[in-house]
Structures are given as C-alpha cells and as structure tokens.
Amino acid sequence: MLEQAKSNIAVSRAFAPFLNAGENGGLINVLYQLKYAKRPFLAQDLVALAAPGLHPFFEQHQFDALVPVPMHFTKVLQRGFNQSKVLAGELSKQHNIPLETQLLRQVKRKKSQASKTRSERQELDSMIFQANSKKAKRYKHVLLLDDVFTTGSTLAACFEALKTQGIPEISYLTLFYTPLESTSIRLLEL
C-alpha cells in the first residue's frame, strides 16, 4: 500500500535549503554532531544558517502547525532527544508557527535510515506512524519537518497517517535533501 501511496503523493509544498553534497560538508558535520554526538544546541546554529532560504519560504506560505517527524519513544530515550523536534522548536520560535508534537507519533520502531542501503530506505512500513484524530480536526494545513530527505519513505508514511485523519493540506520541510536517481515523491518546490 505504501508503494502505491508513494507514487501518488504530491505534497502541497516541499522545501530543503541545503543539498546534502560535498560543498555542504561542514553543514553535514554540524547535523551529524547534533544527532549522533548528542549536541541538540546545534539546532539553533543550523536554523540560523538556513535562515536566508527559509525566510522567503515562510513569508510565502501559511501553516496552522509545525509538526516534527516523530521518533519512537525508545529511540528518544536512547538519543536523549528527537532532532526533528528540536529543529522544529527553533523554527516555531523564529516564524511564530505553533509547534504540534502530539499530532503524529511513531508507533513502531524503525531501523535508522542512516544505516540502511538505498533500496532498504525506500521500504518503510506504512503503519509505522499514526495521527491523532481529535487533534487532526483542528488543522487545515500542516508543515512536516524532518532533518534529511533521502528517499521520501518517511514522508510517505507520515503523509499517509495525516491524510487518513483528514488533514487536507500537508507541506514538507527538511534542512537537507539528498537527491537520488529515482525519488518517488514529487517535490513541487526545491
């Protein structure tokens, strides 16, 4: 079902200020330090560095809520924080968009995308995320936030969970974009 959903997903807006490529090696290192060296304070620096690209994006579009891609609670316990939630908190403060951390949750633990092969990254159980039906009724347009976009499988799973609960418009923001030969999600703005 997710494969079918991935081919049909057209998010309202998608944006990534940084290409995950050699010229951004220093920025990728900052992201690595944030996630794996457990330095959540670096989220403020990444958001500040992305600001020139992000300000026009937020000025042009209105969102009801900023929704970080959730992590399974055991992964949060292991890492100590969810990097997407920390990044979303910084963006929420800077752009005055309500942060919504209870709308979407990860109900099944998934293996880290960073440790998977390219083909394994594209296969993600569509039931890994669930959206809160009561909270979903409050929103017409949400902005999902993740740190890195690679295959779109996480986006597709989150998108499916939110659409199932009736959210009519979903946009996506990620700080880094790693282009692949075949990305199954149509990104409308990059």
Image (spheres, grey):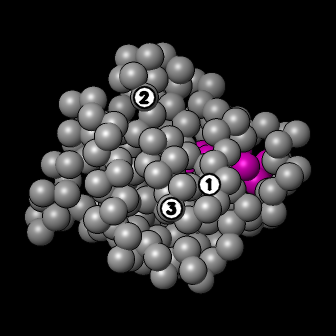
Q: Nearer the viewer, residue 112 or 100?
A: 100
Is residue 131 found inside the magenta-colored segment of the image? no
Name the residue: 76% across, 54% down.
163
Q: Which residues are drawn in magenta?
A: 155-164
Query: Which callout, 2 or 1, points at the residue further toward the start of the chain?
Result: 1
- Label placed on residue 94: 3
In the image: residue 91, left or right of residue 164: left
Amino acid type, residue under disc 2 in the picture: Phe
Q: Is residue 30 left or right of residue 50?
A: left
The majority secondary structure of the magenta stretch comes to helix
The tag on residue 77 is: none
The relative height of residue 108 versus residue 50 in the rendered view (above or below) is above
Of the residues shown, which amino acid type is indicated by label 3? Gln
Q: Is residue 33 left or right of residue 3?
A: left
Q: Which mark is residue 66?
A: 1
**Looking at the image, which residue is at 81% across and 57% down?**
139
Q: Residues within 10 Å of mark 1 (few under 14, many from 20)?
A: many
Label 3 – label 1 distance at C-alpha = 12 Å
Q: Considering only vertical position in the picture, is 22 above or below 66?
A: below
Residue 81: give its label.
Answer: 2
Q: Secondary structure at mark 3?
A: helix
* Mark 3 → mark 2, Cα distance in angstroms: 20 Å
**Contact, mark 2 vs mark 1 (Cβ under 8 Å):** no
Element on which disc 1 rests: strand
Task: Using the image, determine if residue 109 lies above or below residue 23.
Answer: above
